[in-house]
Amino acid sequence: MLRELVPDPTLLALAQAAVASAAALAVALLARARRIHVERELAVALARGLAQISAVGSVLLLMLRGPGWLGVLALAGMMVAAAATSARRARRLPGAFRVSLQAIAAGSGSVIALMALAGVVETGVAVLVPVGSMLIANAMNANGLALDRFRADVLAHRREVESALALGAAPEVSVAPHLQSSFRASLIPAIDSLRSLGIVWIPGLMTGMVLSGTPPLRAAIYQFVIIAMIFASSGLTCLVGTTLVRAQVFSPAEQLLLRTEAERGG
Amino acid sequence: MSFAPVVLRADRLSREVGGRLLVDDVSVEVRQGDVLAVVGPSGAGKSSFLRLLNRLDEPTGGTVWLDGQDYRSLPPRELRRRVGMVMQTPALFDGTVADNLRFGPRQRGADLPDDEVAGLLRQVGLAGFAGRQVERLSGGEAQRVAIARAVANAPEVLLLDEPTSALDEASKREIEALVAGVVRARGLTCLVITHDLAQAARVAGRVLVLEAGRARRVGPVEEVLRAEGTGP
Ligand SMILES: Nc1ncnc2c1ncn2[C@@H]1O[C@H](COP(=O)(O)OP(=O)(O)OP(=O)(O)O)[C@@H](O)[C@H]1O
Ligand SMILES: [Mg+2]
């Protein structure tokens, strides 16, 4: 339908974006009827997302032909941006940005480096940057979930945590159950996407490869490799993130520092 | 007048949060084997004061002396093993009653033998409860387990934050009697928060009255009750 109405390809793309955004906003309005207010946050996020991805799309084309160090620089920049995003999700945790950056850099950085060294993915900028960005984005989501869940869990069980401390337990021991549950919860999306791969979703990367002439089986296995790498990097990120954040919520005298907003305000 | 040694001494203890003094320059000493009741209106800072004594919160002024030693020089875990605490509502860990009793000793690599678990449970009136899952306990039973769990660590000092506030009158008396028994049998030094002056009179030898974070009065229970105008 849009295709007939808008002949110019760029305008057509924009019109398609507008329709998709309208669908997202319509859901926000539905939510609003239930007094769930996400419309502002969503509108801003949609506009930002469109601007960012269009800008990056143009830059990417230039960069893919550029030297290797440019690719590494691009990945480093993505990690910083990812850390800032996931730190915002967990902003009420002390040191959230630093923890997120260290976790994402360690988690996705080491998996990217290892896989490139082992020859599982090609080391050219054209492959490394898009594949790396997928790992970083997923690590970011998992890290945000893990930190937010950890904070909520510890706060909800503060009496148990402090009872354990009061019995002479080490801080690590007192929050161990909550570290485990947040780690597990943060990996659920990655596990589900592994589980449903090919059944619920056919990833875009694979589709693109098949369209550009790669044999379907090769494309499929390559896609599996990417998803498994996503799992490895997300898992490592959460492991590092939750371990680092654990140290942030205790004082040197082993006192739990987390407080609810209400207590801090009062 | 008791001549037993002073086990715990709060020394000009203060805690300020967001410009507000929750605990304001409180000094008090407790001798070995004594029970000190901490009373005062809601919001007076009783819980805040108690949480400073095992250093769950950090004092912003003053310190605590444990057996003559500044508690800031002790590793926090050792301090908390020696100064046990029972909170207002028992926060038991998932698992069995015995798991809860063994938690403290296990932190030091010690394993509490079955007969000691049984002995502790007998002492709090819960003989035969070792294998029970904690989520099946009543409020009074859970509070007894919390007391036994603190005592299982063989502390020198026991801090109790309104241990009976969530219980009915009958269970209240039972817990009082049981605490008195445990304290006597083990020679514990005890600080117990209560908002009930009659309860203070029943369980304690001395009373500290807190008001707006300050120690308004401290002394033998009869004297304080008389001065507060509610005594006999
Ligand atoms: N972490 C905190 N930050 C700021 N204020 C706090 C904090 N903890 C407690 N307060 C405030 O300090 C005051 C004293 O609280 P506390 O719990 O010590 O009183 P309490 O005497 O134990 O009262 P109750 O009898 O109701 O248990 C209260 O006004 C409380 O709101
Ligand atoms: Mg209180």
Image (tube, coloured by chain):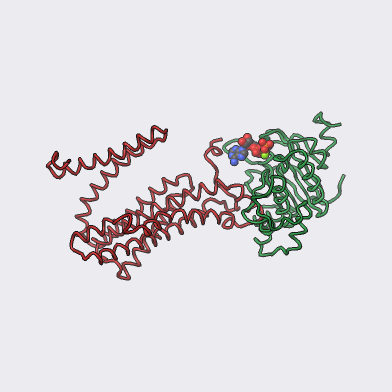
Chain colours: A red, B green
- Residue at horizontal 84%, vertical 35%? B223
Position of the N terminus of chain A, as image quadrant, is: top left
Position of the C terminus of chain A, as image quadrant, is: top right
Query: Which is nearer the eye, B45 or B92?
Result: B92
- Residue at horizontal 46%, vertical 52%? A146
Q: Quadrant of residue B46?
A: top right
Left/right of residue A225 with respect to residue A5 in the rendered view: right
Q: Quadrant of residue B69?
A: bottom right
Can you give x and y, in whole percent of width and height, for residue B166 in the image? 69, 40
Query: Which is nearer the eye, B67 or A3?
Result: A3
The outermost residue toward the bottom is: A118
Can you give x and y, in whole percent of width and height, for residue B200 in the image? 79, 39
User: Is residue A162 visible to us here?
Assistant: yes
User: Is residue B24 visible to us here?
Assistant: no
Can you give x and y, in whole percent of width and height, for residue A112 in the image? 34, 63
The picture quadrant for ligand 1 comes to top right
